[in-house]
C-alpha cells in the first residue's frame, strides 16, 4: 500500500474518533439538560437551605423537614444556661406560605444551557414563612420567663439627698425581671421569620423598661431645681438670738413627685415656723395681747417669707417677722416666771417658764377718784388666807400683796358681779387688783412668794 493511502486511512480513523467523542459529549450535554429540567442547579439555595441537585418534590420535603427541625432558643441567664427555654416551630405555628415558589424557580432554570450555570451561585430569598401570632402569644404566656417566682418591677431614676455631701444626686434607674410581652412577642416573631438561632433576655432589652432614666431631661432639671432650693438657707438673727435653717433641715422641705415636679412641703415649713422659729423667738408661749410684754412671730407672714427665701436659692440672714414686739428683749428685768397685769386690757396672766398657764379678767384702781393702780415691777411679798383689809374694812379669802407699803395686791372681790372692760374707770378699786373669787383661789395656789409682777398699760 502506498504511503498516501495509509495517511488517508489514519485521517479517516481520527475523524471517526472525534465524531464519536463529539456524539458522546452531545449525549452527555443532552442528558445534563434533561436532568436539570427536573433538578435544581448546583449552588441553589433558598433562604439558608441548600437544594442543589434536588427534585421539586425532594426540595419541598427537605425544606419542610428543616423547618420542623428549627427551634428558637431564648437565652435567659449567663450564669445558668440550663434555664434557657426553647420555642419550637409547632409552638409558634411556623410554616411556609409559598412553597409553590420552588416550581417557579425550577421552571425558570435555563436547563438548555445548564453547563454555563453549574459553577454559579443561585440564591433565592423569596420563599416566605409565617408565624401564627395567636399561637405564639399563647405559648409565650406560659413560659417561665413570663412568670418569675419573685416579680421585680422596674424603677425610674430618682433624685435623692446625699446626707454626707449635702446635695441632691440622681440614683440610676433599675430594670426588674418582668418581660414586656409586646416587645418579646415581636422579637420572637422576627426571629422566627429570619430563622435566627436565638434571642437573649440577658441584656434585659425585652424587660419592661423604666419610663425615666438618669439621662432623662426631666430628671436632670428636677435635680438642678432641687439643688437650687437647697442653697436657700436662712439664718435668723435678732440680738443675741440666732437660728439657722441649713441644708440638713432644708432638704426635708423639698419634694419631687413621680413626674419630677419639684415643690416645697408647705405643711412641713409651717410646722418649722410654728415650732422651731416661734419656739426660739417668741418670748412667751401663750396668748397675751399685742403691745404688752410678749414677742411673737407672725406665723403666716413668716411662712410666706421663708418660702420666698427658699425659692430664691440664696443664703439669707434676717430677723424673723413679728406680729408683736414687746419689751427690749436684751433687757433682763422681766424674768421667765412673772405675773403680767395689763391696765388697758383689764386682764392678768401668770407666765411660768415663759409659758402662759393662767389668765383672768380683773378690775384695777378707779381712775375717776384718783386711785389708779400704779405701774411698775414688783414681787409677791407673801400669801395669806382670810385677810381683813383694815383700811377699807374689807374681808377677802385670798390675799397676795405685791406692794404692802401702800397696801396693794391681788385678792378676790365677791362684791363684784363682773370684771374686765371699762369698770375700773368709774367703779374701780382703791388700787388693788380685784379678781373673781374662783380665779383668785386658783391663782393663790399657783404662784409663789417672790414671783415677779409687771404692771403696765
Image: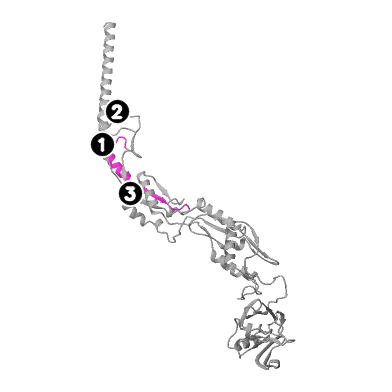
Image side of residue 349 versus residue 403, left or right: left
Q: Is residue 74 above or below residue 426?
A: above
* Tag in front: 3 or 2: 3
Using the rendered view, name the quadrant where residue 50 is placed. Answer: top left
Residue 39, image x, y percentages: 27, 34
Q: Nearer the viewer, residue 88 or 53?
A: 88
Q: Residues within 10 Å of mark 3 (few under 14, many from 20)?
A: some
Query: Which residues, given as a range, are shown in magenta?
Result: 51-78
* Tag in front: 1 or 2: 1
Image side of residue 406 versus residue 358, left or right: right
Residue 304, image x, y percentages: 57, 63
Q: Identify the residue at the far front of this view.
A: 368
Q: CA distance from mark 1 to mark 2?
A: 17 Å
Q: Residues within 10 Å of mark 2 (few under 14, many from 20)?
A: many
SS category of the residue bearing label 1? helix
SS category of the residue bearing label 3? helix
Circles 3 and 1: CB distance less than 8 Å?
no
Q: Indicate which disc, 3 or 2, sits on the residue closer to the N terminus.
A: 3
Circles 3 and 2: CB distance less than 8 Å?
no
Q: Nearer the viewer, residue 321 or 190?
A: 321
- Residue beneath disc 3: 89
Q: Is residue 54 above or below residue 198?
A: above
Q: CA distance from mark 3 to mark 2?
A: 36 Å
Residue 114, labelled with which disc? 2
Residue 6, image x, y percentages: 28, 9
- Residue beneath disc 1: 103
Q: Nearer the viewer, residue 18 or 162?
A: 162
**Residue at 26% over, 18% down:** 19
Residue 311, magenta (yes or no): no
SS category of the residue bearing label 2? helix
Residue 61, magenta (yes or no): yes
Using the rendered view, name the quadrant where residue 297 is placed. Answer: bottom right
Amino acid at each position: 500500500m502506498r504511503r498516501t493511502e495509509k495517511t488517508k486511512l489514519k485521517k479517516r480513523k481520527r475523524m471517526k474518533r472525534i465524531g464519536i467523542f463529539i456524539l458522546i459529549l452531545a449525549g452527555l450535554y443532552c442528558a445534563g439538560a434533561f436532568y436539570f429540567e427536573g433538578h435544581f442547579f448546583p449552588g441553589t439555595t433558598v433562604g439558608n437551605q441548600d437544594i442543589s441537585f434536588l427534585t421539586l418534590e425532594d426540595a419541598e420535603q427537605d425544606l419542610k423537614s428543616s423547618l420542623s427541625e428549627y427551634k428558637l432558643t431564648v437565652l435567659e441567664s449567663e450564669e445558668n444556661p440550663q434555664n434557657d427555654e426553647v420555642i419550637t416551630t409547632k409552638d409558634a405555628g411556623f410554616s411556609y406560605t409559598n412553597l409553590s415558589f420552588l416550581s417557579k424557580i425550577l421552571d425558570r432554570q435555563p436547563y438548555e444551557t445548564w453547563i454555563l450555570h453549574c459553577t454559579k451561585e443561585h440564591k433565592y430569598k423569596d420563599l416566605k414563612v409565617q408565624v401564627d401570632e395567636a399561637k405564639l402569644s399563647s405559648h409565650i404566656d406560659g413560659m417561665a420567663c413570663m412568670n418569675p417566682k419573685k416579680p421585680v418591677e422596674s424603677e425610674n431614676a430618682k433624685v435623692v439627698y446625699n446626707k454626707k455631701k449635702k446635695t441632691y444626686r440622681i440614683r440610676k434607674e433599675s430594670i426588674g425581671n418582668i418581660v414586656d410581652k409586646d416587645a418579646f412577642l415581636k422579637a420572637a416573631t422576627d426571629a422566627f421569620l429570619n430563622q435566627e438561632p436565638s434571642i437573649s433576655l440577658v441584656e434585659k432589652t425585652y424587660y419592661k423598661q423604666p419610663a425615666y432614666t438618669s439621662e432623662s431631661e426631666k430628671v436632670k432639671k428636677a435635680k438642678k431645681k432641687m439643688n437650687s432650693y437647697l442653697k436657700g438657707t436662712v439664718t435668723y438673727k435678732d440680738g443675741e438670738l440666732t437660728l439657722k435653717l441649713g441644708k440638713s433641715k432644708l432638704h426635708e422641705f423639698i419634694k419631687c413627685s413621680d413626674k419630677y415636679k419639684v415643690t416645697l412641703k408647705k405643711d412641713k415649713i409651717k410646722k418649722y415656723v410654728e415650732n422651731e422659729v416661734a419656739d426660739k423667738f417668741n418670748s412667751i408661749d401663750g396668748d397675751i395681747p399685742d403691745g404688752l410684754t410678749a414677742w411673737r412671730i407672725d406665723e403666716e407672714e413668716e411662712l410666706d417669707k421663708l418660702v420666698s427665701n427658699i425659692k430664691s436659692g440664696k443664703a439669707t440672714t434676717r430677723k424673723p417677722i413679728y406680729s408683736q414686739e414687746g419689751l427690749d428683749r436684751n433687757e433682763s428685768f422681766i424674768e421667765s416666771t412673772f405675773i403680767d397685769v395689763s391696765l388697758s386690757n383689764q386682764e392678768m396672766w401668770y407666765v411660768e417658764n415663759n409659758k402662759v398657764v393662767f389668765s383672768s379678767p380683773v378690775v384695777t384702781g378707779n381712775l375717776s377718784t384718783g386711785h389708779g393702780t400704779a405701774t411698775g415691777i414688783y414681787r409677791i411679798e407673801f400669801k395669806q388666807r382670810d385677810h381683813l383689809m383694815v383700811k377699807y374694812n374689807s374681808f377677802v379669802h385670798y390675799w397676795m400683796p405685791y406692794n404692802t407699803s401702800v397696801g396693794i395686791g391681788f385678792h378676790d372681790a365677791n362684791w363684784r358681779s363682773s370684771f374686765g372692760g371699762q369698770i375700773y374707770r368709774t367703779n374701780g378699786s382703791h388700787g388693788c387688783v380685784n379678781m373673781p373669787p374662783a380665779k383668785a383661789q386658783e391663782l393663790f395656789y399657783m404662784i409663789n412668794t417672790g414671783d415677779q409682777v409687771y404692771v403696765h398699760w
